[in-house]
Image (cartoon, rainbow, N blue to C red):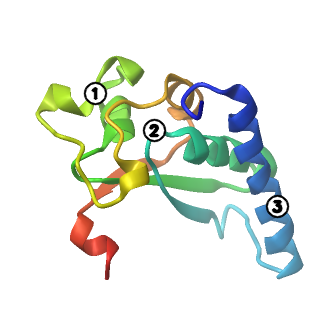
Amino acid sequence: DDESSRVLFLGYSAAAFELRAQLAELNVEVSPERPLVVHIPCGVGGAPGGLCWGMHLAFGAAQPVRVFFAEPVAAPCVTLALCTGKGAAVCVADIGLDGKTEADGLAVGRASALCFETCAPLVEGSYTIEDCTLFE
C-alpha cells in the first residue's frame, strides 16, 4: 500500500543515500552555494515523499536540497493538498478535475496523508505539466 506504508516510505528514502554516494563519487558538490535541485514525478506521493524526506536526511540542512513535485494538470492531488493545507481531506474531484491523464501511474485523485504530513515542510514546491509535454 504505497499510500500509507511507512516501510515503503522508508525504502524509497534509501535512494537518497544512494544518490548522495553517486554524486560524491562523481565529485559533484552539494552546498549552500550549489544546492541540489530535484524534480520528481508525483502521483499519490509515496515514492516522491520518501525521496524528498530521504534527501533532507542524506544531505542535511547545511547542504540544501530543493525538491519539486511534478504532477499532471488533471491530477494534481499533492499540489492541491499542499496549497489548501487539507492534506488527504481534499481530492481533485472537489475542484472539478477528472484525474484522467496519459501518465497512468500519476492519475491519482487524493494525496497520501503520510506524504503530506511528512513532506509539507520539506518540499520546495510543486507544479503541473500537460500530458502533451510528457511526450516531447
**Percent coordinates x, y for residue 94 in the rendering:** 17, 25
Which residue is painted at 75% across and 31% down in the image? 7
**Percent coordinates x, y for residue 118 in the rendering:** 59, 29
In the rendered image, the quadrant that contains the N terminus is: top right
> Which callout, 2 or 3, points at the residue further toward the start of the chain?
3
User: Mark 2, mark 3: which one is toward the viewer?
Assistant: 2
Which residue is painted at 16% across and 39% down in the image? 97
Q: Identify the residue position indicated by label 1 in the image.
A: 91
- Furthest residue toward left: 96
In the rendered image, the quadrant that contains the C terminus is: bottom left
Task: Return the mark for residue 18.
Answer: 3
Badge 2 vs badge 3, beta-carbon distance below 8 Å:
no
Q: CA distance from mark 2 to mark 1?
A: 11 Å
Vertical arrangement, residue 44 with respect to residue 104, above or below: above
Q: Amino acid at mark 2?
A: Val
Task: Return the mark for residue 15.
Answer: none
Q: Identify the residue position indicated by label 2 in the image.
A: 44
Q: Amino acid at mark 3?
A: Glu
Q: CA distance from mark 2 to mark 3?
A: 23 Å
Q: Amino acid at mark 1?
A: Cys
